[in-house]
Amino acid sequence: MSIQLTVNKKKMSLDIDPNTPLLWALRDSMSLKGTKYGCGIAQCGACTVWVNGEATRSCVLPISAVANADITTIEGLSDHGDHPVQVAWDELDVPQCGYCQAGQIMTAASLLKKKPNPSKTEIVDGMSGNICRCGTYHRIQEAVKLASEIASKKKTKSTVKKSA
Amino acid sequence: MKSTRRSFIQKTALFSGAFCLGFDWFQANGKEVSMVQTTMDSGRFNAFLAIDPSGKIILYSPNPEIGQGIKTAFPVVVAEELDVDWKDVEVRQANLDTQNFERQLTGGSGALKHSWERLRKAGATARKMFIQAAAQTWNVDASTCKTSKGFVLGPKGQKASYGSLVAIASKLPVPTEVTYKNRKDYQIIGKRTKGVDNKSVVTGKPVFGLDIEKPGMVIAQIIRPPFGATLKSFDAADALKMPGIVDVVSFKNKVAIVGKSTWEVMKARATVSCKYDSGDFDSDSTHQKWFDEGMKTDKATVQRKDGDFAAALARSAKVVEATYECPFISHSPMEPMNFFADVRADGTVILAGPTQVPQSAQKAVASLLKIDEKKVEVELSKMGGGFGRRLNNDFALDAAELSSIIKKPVKVMWTREDDMGGGIYRPAARYHFKAGLDASGNMIAFYLRGVGINAGNATRQDNFPVGAIENVLVESVNQVSAVTTGPWRAPITNFLGYAEQAFLDEVAEAGGKDPVQMRLDWLARVKSNPVGKITYEPDRFIEVIKQAAEKSNWKNKPGIHQGFSVYFSHLSYVAQVADAQMVDGKAKITHVTAVTDCGEVVNLSGAENQIKGAIIDGIGHALFAKLRFNDGVASPTNFNGYRLIKGNEIPTINAYFVDNGIEPTGLGEPALPPTGGSIANALYAATKKRLYKQPFEV
Ligand code: FES
Ligand code: FES
């Protein structure tokens, strides 16, 4: 029985064990290696993707549970790597080893969708489920703030354009 | 090998018309830069600084990138002396190439120290040749020309890009004498340079070991025995019938499940049962017994002896004693161990993946398979952290042995449970200190015994305040266990540093002294009249201590409880002041001030990352980390039981660097050892409770 889903705007049909965690379906069956394995038990956040726009841990989510769902991974977050969160992450030089960062970025981008102008506490709380063994937490928190500023500037610009 | 190298830089015109300078980062005599011929013959660029006619500079970074930022820091130094715009530089990771590189490894925070001079020379030599090429073209004296951002500027306003000078420069003799930039003219060194891999990281490019995919590759996981146990039998009948399973094989007490996809392997693995022999395998109680015995034995190894400790202790007015203990802990890099190996029918081997020491992987695999090292090729991937774990190539050996058995290219992947339960830990240790104080509270006798389990020498016998104290005795005892251990970020000192700095806080208190002033007094003594051999520079110590006291407003912050520590390791000096506050009746570390002397800071952004990361690492492991052992089995084995510090548990950190322009030294580790001490001392100031065990019970 094949499972249909949309991944990064592409329709996919997979013929695999329905219990396969979405993480391994992405990495092994779809060759999307950006989503990372860290713990496999929903403890670290390295595997965070969006399922129908919601940040979700893909390591414990069977593929059968996301049939017909719309999945976004780090590879699909933006067309040119220029999502405000990605820009802010580079700008503030967040990554050390970089391994946790796809999960951090997907979590941050989801946080900003819900709260375009998060307070310091909202940032700290919103990001605290994602482990970074290298300890890049300060810059993660600063970068979420910067991303929200970049996004709001972009928005003002496009509104101005429209009204002109 | 060395005789095939030229002992000075040579240039060569590449087939593409590029200008190439080979620079051997590792020439044994230390300061020379050499051309590497073999690379040219094979048409590869390794070890080259290459500038093509468009002005693009390509630089191969030989050292494994583990998150320490070496892939950015190395090229920064070359680009600075070459005097080019950073945006024109492209950095690529070199694979293992023992012909052309030495010390192609990550460990000991030693890369920049080792390569600083070589990197500068590589850049400065090329720059000089472009100047000469331009001077020749314009028919002016070379001394009248300058460079700026990849251009040579002539006396009459002439301007030529390096790219346009490639053809001429490549025909010039290579200068043997070059001058370096004055550090006040630095454009890139000391500034903030973003990580060269940031773009691929934030877009999810497959750069890590676990991302490796090769034609015909299968995936495997390995069941490892309890420490000390022998595999008697295993039953894989069900697993072999499961979809996607290629094979289940056993070697060296291990059972490998091989299949086409990760999930299929995981599912099949769960059905495999293994039987082991029974025996007296390690448990926590075993380790406690060994510590007790190690503390009592009269067979300790004397690591250092100055004066007469026992006599000095006997005449002391006051004696301070304390015992500290740390458990085995896991490295837990975010990317679990993994490695790819393809042992081919033609006798060649391809290894690929994350290792801090590719050359020893090559050697170890060659000796395992009894083949020539030259037959083993190692491709380096980016590493999702290592913290010392990837200094041990057990994962590469497993992959190679498995590939040789199943005769297929294979990627062996460790689950988190495998990674945390599978060994190579920070050794467990117990330390006992004694200090004898005279009537005015000065320490006249200092004793340390370190008992480690698979730790080798668990002490660092020359550590300050040794050198300032008249009577010193440092001893070590090593207990041997089946539990495997290895270096863990700042080996030994990651805990010893805490124990020493916490003990000195007790000594200061017992002697009625301020912890900062006490250390400054000792260092004054070391300067005028050191006791025995000293390995540190007292002036550099004094400077970080003074700056940390000043920047943290030492003992001058009402309502804030402060703790001090200072440490010298990996040739760098770090002083820390931690601030603790009582929040809802509990002590909480709210801020850390760190002053580091690591000589010249090459990349300020990367340097700050290393300092803050190491401090967070130090706090997290001091507060939470612990593995327990029962019958040879470690637990917990995942992040639900083994806590890593999270983003809502960190203090603010101010990281300062001493601006002295001395040759750069280590940065990846030195800020970790003083961290446990500064926070324990701050927590003591807040609660009056001393912390003797890691993890702290706060
Ligand atoms: S891998 Fe999914 S949360 Fe850790
Ligand atoms: S950057 Fe290494 S784990 Fe986060």
Image (cartoon, coloured by chain):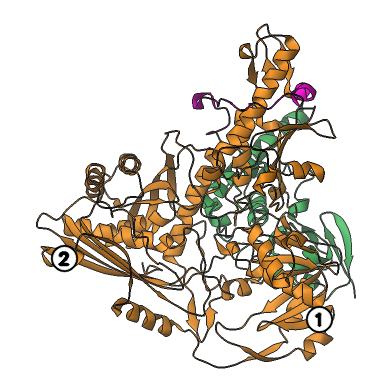
Magenta extent: B163-190
| Residue drawn at (53%, 23%) of the image | B185
- The answer to whether residue B428 is left or right of residue A73 is left
Hey, which quadrant is residue A40 in on the image? bottom right
Mark 2: few/some/many CA within 10 Å (<14, 14-19, 20+): many
What's the magenta bit mostly, secondary-structure-wise? loop
Gap between marks 2 and 1 measured at Cα:
65 Å
* Chain letter, colour orange in render: B
**Residue B421 position in % (x across, y down):** 57, 76
**What secondary structure is marked by label 1?**
strand
Observer-nearest of B3 and B171: B3
**Residue B334 position in % (x across, y down):** 61, 62
* Chain letter, colour green in render: A
**Residue A89 position in % (x across, y down):** 63, 45
The label number, if any, that marks residue B313 in the structure image: 2
| Residue drawn at (73%, 44%) of the image | B46
Residue B333 seen in the current view: no
Q: Earlier in the sequence, mark 2 or mark 1?
A: 1
- Residue sitting farthest toward the front: B3
Protein chain holding label 2? B
Ligand 1, by image quadrant, is bottom right
Same chain check for tags 2 and 1: yes
**Residue B33 position in % (x across, y down):** 63, 37
Location of mark 1 (residue): B247
Task: Count all numbered tags in the image, as a single digit.
Answer: 2
- The answer to whether residue B614 is left or right of residue B401 is left
